[in-house]
Structure formats: structure tokens, C-alpha cells
Image: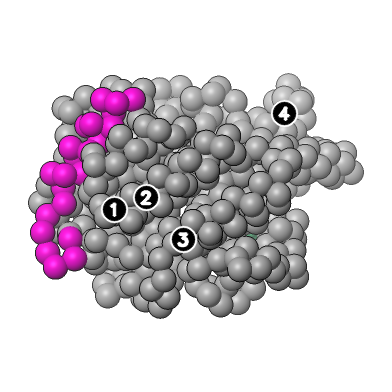
Amino acid sequence: MIFSKYNITSGIRDSENYFIVNLLSGNADILTPEDAEKIRAAREGKDIIDNEFKNDLIDKGYLINQAEESKEYRRKYLDFLDSRDKDEIQIFFVTNYSCNFACHYCYQDQYDHPSNKLSREVVDAFFDYVNKEFAARKKYITIFGGEPLLNTPVQKDIIGYIIQKSNEAGLSLCFVTNGYFLEEYIPLLKKGDIREIQVTLDGTESVHNNRRFLKGGGGTFEKIVKGIDKSLEKGININLRMVVDKKNIDNLADLSRLAMEKGWTASPLFKTQLGRNYELHHCQSSPDKLFDRISLYEKIYEMIKIHPHILDFHKPAYSVSKYLEENGELPGPLFDSCPACKTEWAFDYTGNIYSCTATVGKTDESLGTFYPSVTRKEEIIDNWESRDVTSIAECRDCSVQLACGGGCGSVAKNRTGNICSPDCRPVKELMELGFSQYFRSI
Ligand code: SF4
Ligand code: SF4
């Protein structure tokens, strides 16, 4: 029996205890310092004298027979591929790259785009492609920009047409919007099967207005908040996204309070996400204001100690920790965390096909066209489709691979030039925080 290479162990933050997690066997335990010492010995290949403890480690798959574990890995990998084939596909459609906002961190400002408008002919070609290419798959469409909900008659007409086509195809819709004209769009949105609207609010009034203002100037907070209120009132799901960096993170506690006072957090229609402002496509003017993944979660962890009500607004995942607390069991092994070209695709009004929202609009990353004719760069698509922890050399021997899943293919490609390269996640460090946050009382 040897120590499983998929064991993840470390100390729990602000505690004398430790944790051990094994996503292949599906077990997790909190360890006393004494038990952690025995585990350390086992990892170094030393025999464990305490037989009861040793048998427990064997039962839970922390100590394994290597050949048996390899078989189990292959079995679970095939299960993973199987279940992913049955997963729903999220299909993004960019109606335009133009926007009425001039957010200072917007990455789309560097893209050059043809100024032609989205026509009904292109919408028809998009639905023809989707209905044919993904005929056997469950799917839904997310409308994306730029800003898709612009308040012009032409834009309202084309959004109305997309809603009509989605209804005909029996597909539900999500919208990603800055929320400025949300209220004006509600009557139209109510005609479709709307799954959720993602709206960005970067803080309370002055903080938000300092970051997300109209082109030409002007605050946007008040109108967005009104749109959220009205949407919830009309039964539309809202996914509130706060894009954070070092300039606005301290406002998280106040924004959480505001969401509670407005009654949003008590609504079953309301959920939140924190988006990390990061250098995906080009250098930010002040990169020192950006968090890396772990420093962001360290900061949030410390803030929650002082302002525990933040947890009513947003519960950080800290890798698998939140899932474990909410479900009483671990998620299945994550052989792949990048959905691009597997359960996510992106299309835009110019007729191009992309892997996902991280590449959409970068014409050199186009994977083909759906309009005016259908073309596909099969070799690059194969490359995206094959990306997982079994095809990335660096991931194969990594102990956290089944929690990390290899990270984001686009970030990896930007860094190394190769889609099948790693984008490492600080899994162990996140779990150190997560076990402390969610299991401190155990
Ligand atoms: S490339 Fe990155 S952004 Fe795109 S689907 Fe993969 S993980 Fe998501
Ligand atoms: S991307 Fe890095 S951390 Fe993630 S599985 Fe691969 S090697 Fe491990």
C-alpha cells in the first residue's frame, strides 16, 4: 500500500488542525496534529504502527494499491467524459461589440470590429448552425456584448427577433448586460424563456460610478439598481456580478449590506458572483491594483472575519470547500475545468465561431464561420476539445489535478502559446482558507 498521489493535505488556516482530501476516492477528513503527523510519515513511505488508523486510511483510499488506483482513475475518467457529453452546452452569441459604457478596465476596447449591424439573416444562420450542429445536445443561449441591451429601436427589434427564434427552437436565454437599460427591456424579455440576467455592479454608488460610467461621463448606479429591483419584481432571475480589484474590494461589505437592505439576498431569484479583474488580453494601466487568485481569496477571507454578513451576499467557493459544506460530500473528480469547445462555444454577429467568451472577438482565434458559409478549423477545434488533465503533460503527476482541472485554456495559451498547457490554480491554499471558513466549528 502506498500514499495516493491524489491526496491533498495541508494545515487549516487559523487552526492547529489539518485536512486531507482525495477527489478520486471521494473522501475528506479533518486531522488532529497527531493524525497529521502519522499521515506525514505515510507520505514519506514509513509504515503506520496504529493498525486501526491505517485501515481507515485504506478504506478511504488515502493508502492505495497503485494498480487498483490506476484502474479507478481510468474508470472515473470515462464516467467524466460520458457525463460531460450529456451536459448542457452554453452557447454565447455576441450581438455587437459596441457599448454605451466606458469602464476603465474593459478589455474589448482594443478590438477592431466591423461596424456592420447584426441582420436577421445572420441570426437565422446562427440558429440554423446551432440547431444542426448541437441537435442532440441540451443547450441554452447567452446573449453577450459589448452591451446587447442598447436602447435603440434597431437593437430592440433584433433582440426581439432573437427571443422569437429562441422560442421557436425551444431554447432558454441568458443575457449578460451592464444593466443600464434593463428596465426598458423587461416587457420584451418577458416574451422569452429567460433563465437569468447577469448584471454588473462594482460597489455602492460612488465606488461603482467611479469605475463604470457612461461614454462621455455620467453615473450608472441608480438606473442599474432600479433595473435589478424591477426585474426581481417581475420574476426574472438576477445574477449580480461584482468585478473586483484592489481599488474596490473594500467596498464588498457595503455592497453586501445594500443588497441585504434592498431585500435582494432574501430573494430566491437573486445570486451573486465575484469576477476577478485580471489581465486576460492586454496590460491594464495599473496592474499593481489587480489581485492574483490567492491574494483575492485571502483578502475576502480576512474581510469575512470582520464583516461576516458578506457570506449572506456571497459565499466563496475556496476550491471544493463550499461544495463540501453545502452538500456533505465532495464533487466528482474534475478532469477538466475549461469548458471551451466542449460545453461552451461563442459566436458573433460577424459570422465567426470561437471557443468561449475569453477568445470571442479575437479574429486570429476564430475557429471558423457560420455565416456567410460554414467553415471549421478542425485541427484547432480538436486541440481545444482534447484539453484536460490527461492531455496536459504538467498536470499528469500533479497531486491537485482532480480539484484544479488544468485551469483556463485561454490564459494558458496567452502565457505559453499552447492550448494544452497548464493554468495552475492554488488549490491547496484555497482549501486551507475554505476548511477554516466552513468547517471551523468541527
Ligand atoms: S478558455 Fe478560459 S474562459 Fe474560455 S472556457 Fe476555458 S476556462 Fe473558460
Ligand atoms: S494546471 Fe497546474 S495545478 Fe492545475 S492540475 Fe495542471 S499542473 Fe496541477
In what element is the residue under mark 4?
A: loop
- Estimate the spatial distance between the alpha carbons at disc 4 and disc 2, rounded to whole Å: 58 Å
Label whose residue precedes the other's in the sequence (1 or 3): 3
Residue type at mark 3? Ser
- Estimate the spatial distance between the alpha carbons at disc 1 and disc 3, rounded to whole Å: 14 Å
Q: What mark, if any, has residue 157 been given in the picture?
A: 2
Position of residue 115 relative to residue 178, above or below, is below
- Estimate the spatial distance between the alpha carbons at disc 2 and disc 1, rounded to whole Å: 6 Å
Identify the residue at image location x=45%, y=22%. Answer: 442
Residue type at mark 4? Lys
Residue type at mark 1? Pro
Q: What mark, if any, has residue 60 been given in the picture?
A: 4
The image position of residue 381, as x and y in percent, is: 70, 64
The residue identified by callout 1 is 153
Q: For mark 1, does the 10 Å Cα neighbourhood hold few (<14), some (14 to 19), or many (20 or more) residues?
A: few
Q: Nearer the viewer, residue 42 or 79?
A: 79
In what element is the residue under mark 3?
A: loop
Identify the residue at image location x=41%, y=52%. Answer: 158
Give the quadrant of residue 74.
top right
Identify the magenta region.
214-235
